[in-house]
Image: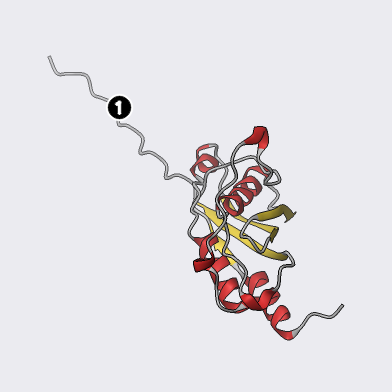
Amino acid sequence: MTASPSAARLTALVAALSLSLSPLAAVAQEPAAPGGAALPEAASAAEAPATTEDYVAAVIARINSVRLNTATLRDAGITGDFTTRVTFTTGADGRLVSSAVSESSGHPMFDNIAMAQIRSAEPFPLFAPDMGDADRSFSILVTSNIPALPEAPAEEAAEPPAE
């Protein structure tokens, strides 16, 4: 099956997406609701984008609206540049169908942060009318630079009081 030019552009746009995180760790797992917990409400029809390109822009905006805290990594002494590729699938109703780390950053805690960002962005917009009902898959890079904490100045030795 060959992809149409608009599907190829959609894939290229999403593949080129690189997100910047400001961090908080979570356990990576599929988006099933454990223990019967409620899933997020689906998006309303009024929020549906008009075209496939609008849909991609809305997905990107939705993911970018979620900011997670990587301070837990820095506080644990984990610093540097991290990039994780996350693949996820959305349904026509705005639900996150699946998500997975497809390329690890090499650090599981950061990979978990990337997964949490995608899960936290649910519900996604409803599909545009030109998209049909088939689930859509995306692959994005989630990147972050976690700087080291500045070194605290050494306290000067207190001189004994003069007598």
Q: Residue at x 66, y 78 (%)?
A: 130
Residue 66, image x and y in percent? 50, 55
- Dot 1, crowdedness within 10 Å: few (<14), some or many (≥20)? few
Q: Nearer the viewer, residue 122 or 152?
A: 122
Q: Residue extending furthest top?
A: 163
Horizontal arrangement in the rendering, residue 106 relative to residue 157 (left or right): right
Q: Quadrant of residue 12?
A: bottom right
Residue 14, image x and y in percent? 65, 70
Which amino acid, by three-letter code, is at mark 1?
Ala
Q: Residue at x 30, y 27 (%)?
A: 157
Q: Residue extending furthest left?
A: 163
Q: Quadrant of the C terminus?
A: top left
Horizontal arrangement in the rendering, residue 104 relative to residue 67 (left or right): right
Q: How many marks?
A: 1
Q: Residue extending furthest bottom?
A: 5
**Residue 58 versus residue 8 in the image, above or below:** above
**Residue 18 versus residue 148 in the image, above or below:** below
According to the image, label 1 marks what residue?
A: 157
Q: Residue at x 63, y 43 (%)?
A: 109
Residue 124, image x and y in percent? 58, 60
Q: Quadrant of the N terminus?
A: bottom right
Query: Which coloring applies here?
Result: secondary structure
- Residue 103 visible to an observer of this rendering: no
Residue 76, image x and y in percent? 55, 37
Q: What element does badge 1 sit on?
A: loop
